[in-house]
Amino acid sequence: MPATISATEIRHLILAAQRQGSRMMADHLRAASLTPAQAEVLQVLATREPLTLVELGRLMISETGSPSRLVDTLVTRGLVAREPGRDDKRVVRLRLTPAGQQTLADGRAQTAIIDDLITRRLAPGEMAELARLLRKLLQDTPGGHAIEMRYPTT
Amino acid sequence: MPATISATEIRHLILAAQRQGSRMMADHLRAASLTPAQAEVLQVLATREPLTLVELGRLMISETGSPSRLVDTLVTRGLVAREPGRDDKRVVRLRLTPAGQQTLADGRAQTAIIDDLITRRLAPGEMAELARLLRKLLQDTPGGHAIEMRYPTT
DNA sequence: ACGACATCAATGACATGTCATGAATGATAT
DNA sequence: ATATCATTCATGACATGTCATTGATGTCGT
């Protein structure tokens, strides 16, 4: 192990970990007919509904401005229901359909496999330390705010 | 800080760190008229040339099978030169052009800013630990192999 | 009531990663 | 010499993230 790790190497390690994880997630979620981004939409809607597009976008880790097309696909597939806002006609309100809830359950079974892989490789103390270091990198950034909304530390 | 960190949180932290880093890189590299993936191509070609497409793909962290279109764009822009292989007609040989070398220099100045942000946030010991933990996650995976080729540990 | 500004969602355009396919070429076995 | 298999690269199709633009709608100040 070299004496010092460069920042470039850190960047590449994060990219490699994300890409590898994404490939594995996609592989497993294929069995549930979902992509990783679609699975995240269903998961976020399961925890709180209805949500507007902007709210959904803020709660997703990717923090897209307004994930219209992603949601569009799920609506077309009958997994998400979209209805106009009552008080504000600009807004749409999104909910899971029964089919969406079922597909989410299938997806959860698949993502649990990936989570298990992580849990087998890192001890609880290591996971805590990895989380601490990544949060430190993300401090005071939009990405960090999205994480804070999803996983508050206070 | 909760007692235990879930594997799901680790996945989301990695994604957030990668997305945030990618946005910042894209922001800075715009000044050099490059995207993060294009900058990586130029960087890999600067360290060793000529390369075939498959070799380039293997050395890139994304480890794409054969990054034809990415390279196509760079050839069109005159930053990379493509010539037929001498012994094997299937193969193309890729090199940086003088314009590519200049653009790479501009890109390096920009990525140095991002690297500096990382260096300011994490102490050397923390960077070493972050690298160790991410490598542990990547062990015995294709993504880990790409990292090993780029940053050997032996 | 009206104008200015802000917000929401949809859409266009582009980059790129992923999966699959096909054509051309090289290697190997018979 | 020929058939089979493997490799390389280009391309099609799709998903999705990013940036920008547009139209509709809501809020606020005058």
Image (cartoon, coloured by chain):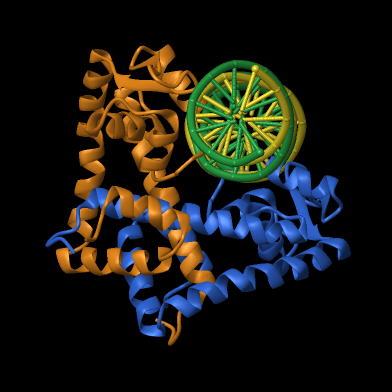
Chain colours: A blue, B orange, C green, D yellow
| Residue B136 coordinates in the image, percent (x, y) | 37, 69
Closer-to-camera residue (B144/A105): B144
Is A137 above or below relative to A69? below
- In the image, taking residue A82 as reference, residue A36 lies left or right, namely left
Instruction: Identify the residue at horizontal 44%, vertical 64% (top origin).
Output: B140
| Residue A131 coordinates in the image, percent (x, y) | 38, 71
| Residue A67 coordinates in the image, percent (x, y) | 65, 45
Q: Is residue B26 visible to the viewer in this orientation of the structure?
A: yes
Instruction: Identify the residue at horizontal 49%, vertical 52% (top origin).
Output: A19
Image quadrant in which the N terminus of chain A is located: bottom left
Instruction: Identify the residue at horizontal 63%, vertical 49% (top origin).
Output: A54
Is A13 above or below relative to A109? above
Closer-to-camera residue (C21/A33): C21
- Quadrant for residue B119, please give it: bottom left
Q: Residue furthest left?
A: A3
Closer-to-camera residue (A129/B147): B147
Total marks placed: 0
Is B77 above or below relative to B130? above
Q: Is residue B66 visible to the viewer in this orientation of the structure?
A: no
| Residue A103 coordinates in the image, percent (x, y) | 80, 63
- Quadrant for residue B128, please give it: bottom left
Instruction: Identify the residue at horizontal 63%, vertical 73% (top origin).
Output: A112
Closer-to-camera residue (B119/A67): B119
